Amino acid sequence: MEDLMAKEMCQAKQALLSGCSAGGLAAILRCDDFGNMFPPSTRVKCLTDAGFFLDA
């Protein structure tokens, strides 16, 4: 992310963080951190697909 932000991603008007399975869990856990990387004017969304694991 730091590399992309250095390449002017910080000027994006919209950003989407997504993941599937283990990547979906990571998207859940890091969604707030991802949103905090952008200015308040940027619309940030997080999308997870099957990112929930039961501790059984």
Image: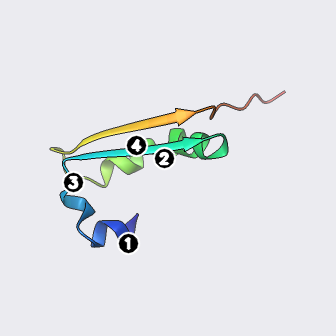
Left or right, residue 48 beside residue 39: right
Give the quadrant of residue 19: top right
Task: Look at label 3 and name its amino acid.
Answer: Ala
| Disc sitting over residue 12 in the figure | 3
Q: What residue would you read off at disc 1?
A: 3
Q: CA distance from mark 1 to mark 2?
A: 17 Å
> Residue at image x 53%, y 35%?
48
Q: Please name the residue shown 15% across and 44% down the image.
A: 41
Secondary structure of residue under mark 1: helix
Q: Would you say 56 lies left or right of 36 here?
A: right
Q: Which residue is mark 2?
A: 30
| Mark earlier in primary sequence (3, 2) | 3
Q: CA distance from mark 3 to mark 2?
A: 19 Å
Contact, mark 4 vs mark 2 (Cβ under 8 Å): yes
Label 1 and label 4: CA atoms lie apart by 19 Å
Along the polypeptide, which appears first: circle 4 or circle 3? 3
